[in-house]
Amino acid sequence: MKDESIKRIMTPHPKKISLAANVGQAVDILKSGAIHHLPVVDNGKLVGIVSTTDLICVNPLNGNRSVADINLPIEDIMKPNPISLKSNVSLRIAAETLSSGEFHSLPIVDHQNILVGIVTSTDLIKHLLMHIPKGDGSLKPVSLEALKLRVQLLEEVRVSAELYLRTGLGEHEHATLLEKLAAARNDGVNI
């Protein structure tokens, strides 16, 4: 599996909340969809993030105000200046960043810190699962173009091997056969 851009798996234009909002509005947004992380923006720029865990932590048992206080400013419970990534970074960097275990989402911003997407640990796990063979050894479906390329590479190996066998141990034919085998292996063909 090769490393890819985070754009491949990020959710573009994620749900977000304004810095001027309150806890009640955040609860409504989080309940409205299957999301657990809500970026906080001020004029489109990322300034914080609120998670369902943050809402759980704001309760009377912790000595804090109750979530029932829906007028509590979002700024009072958000994590300010969350770690974020630019949209051109690799999946590896996102995975390494999330693997710290301190948080489970990464807001994605442009060069002006404008929110453009979000990636969660669940997004990375789903992507990984698409690239790991199933228990029976089967792999994810391959595109028709990729199959055509592999067939072409295998045909080139077959032609080179046939030429090599018909002409004996000629240096040129041997080198050509090795070159075609290497090209096929580099494309993931098991030979």
Image: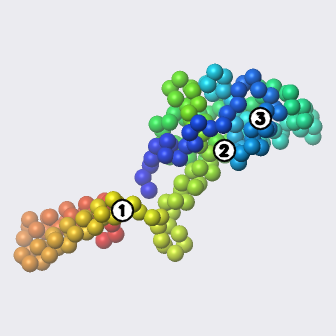
Q: Which residue is mark 2?
A: 104
Q: Which residue is mark 3?
A: 26
Q: Which one is in front, 29 or 67?
A: 29
How far is mark 2 from mark 1, CA to CA?
Answer: 35 Å
Q: Nearer the viewer, mark 3 or mark 2?
A: 3
What amino acid type should be assigned to the residue bearing mark 2?
His
Q: Quick one: label 2 or label 1, which is nearer the N terminus?
A: 2
Camera sees residue 160: yes
Q: Disc 2 on helix, strand or loop?
A: loop
Q: Quick one: label 3 or label 2, which is nearer the N terminus?
A: 3
Q: Nearer the viewer, mark 2 or mark 1?
A: 1
What amino acid type should be assigned to the residue bearing mark 1?
Leu
Within the image, what quadrant is residue 153 found in? bottom left
| For residue 188, side relative to residue 31 (left or right) | left
Residue 130 sits above or below residue 80 on the image: below
- Work out which quarter of the rendered image holds the C terminus and state it: bottom left
Q: Quick one: label 1 or label 3, which is nearer the N terminus?
A: 3
Q: Residue at x 51, y 33 (%)?
A: 86
Camera sees residue 97: no
